[in-house]
Image: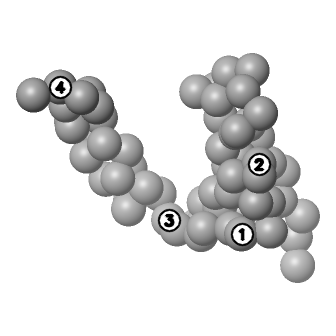
Amino acid sequence: MHTLHWQKSTYSGDSTNCLHVAATPTGNAVHLRESDTPDTILTTTQAPLHALIHTLKALPPEGAH
């Protein structure tokens, strides 16, 4: 098994609640975890993650009517 190299999301800033991301060496899988629950890892591939991010960016800001 390979070792994942986790990187803190740039959107986390200086916050202690951070999102970390790691990719497999082949790039086939993307792993996500939160700093407060590092043992819980979400694994996906690039296409679904891209679709999720695209969808979230298209949503109106929270509290907007």
Query: Which quadrant of the structure image shows residue 53?
Result: top left
Dot 1: what SS? strand
Amino acid carrying label 4: it is Ala
Q: Give the residue drawn at x 38%, y 62%.
A: 48
For this orientation, the residue located farthest to the bottom is 1
Residue wearing tag 4: 64
Crowd class of label 3 (few under 14; some 14 to 19; many from 20; radius 10 Å): few
Sequence order check, earlier mark of 1 and 3: 1
For this orientation, the residue located farthest to the left is 65
Query: Which quadrant of the structure image shows residue 4?
Result: bottom right
Dot 4: what SS? loop
Locate residue 10, reporting x and y percent. 64, 26
Q: Give the residue drawn at x 65%, y 34%.
A: 9
The answer to whether residue 4 is left or right of residue 33 is right
Circle on res. 35: 2
Circle on res. 45: 3
Sequence order check, earlier mark of 2 and 1: 2
Sequence order check, earlier mark of 3 and 4: 3
Between marks 4 and 1 in the image, the one whose residue lies nearer the viewer: 4
Question: Is residue 6 depicted above or below 65 in this figure?
Answer: below
The answer to whether residue 7 is left or right of residue 50 is right
Residue wearing tag 1: 40
15 or 46: which is nearer to us?
Answer: 15
Q: CA distance from mark 3 to mark 4?
A: 31 Å
Amino acid carrying label 1: it is Thr
Q: CA distance from mark 4 to mark 1?
A: 32 Å
Locate residue 65, reporting x and y percent. 9, 28
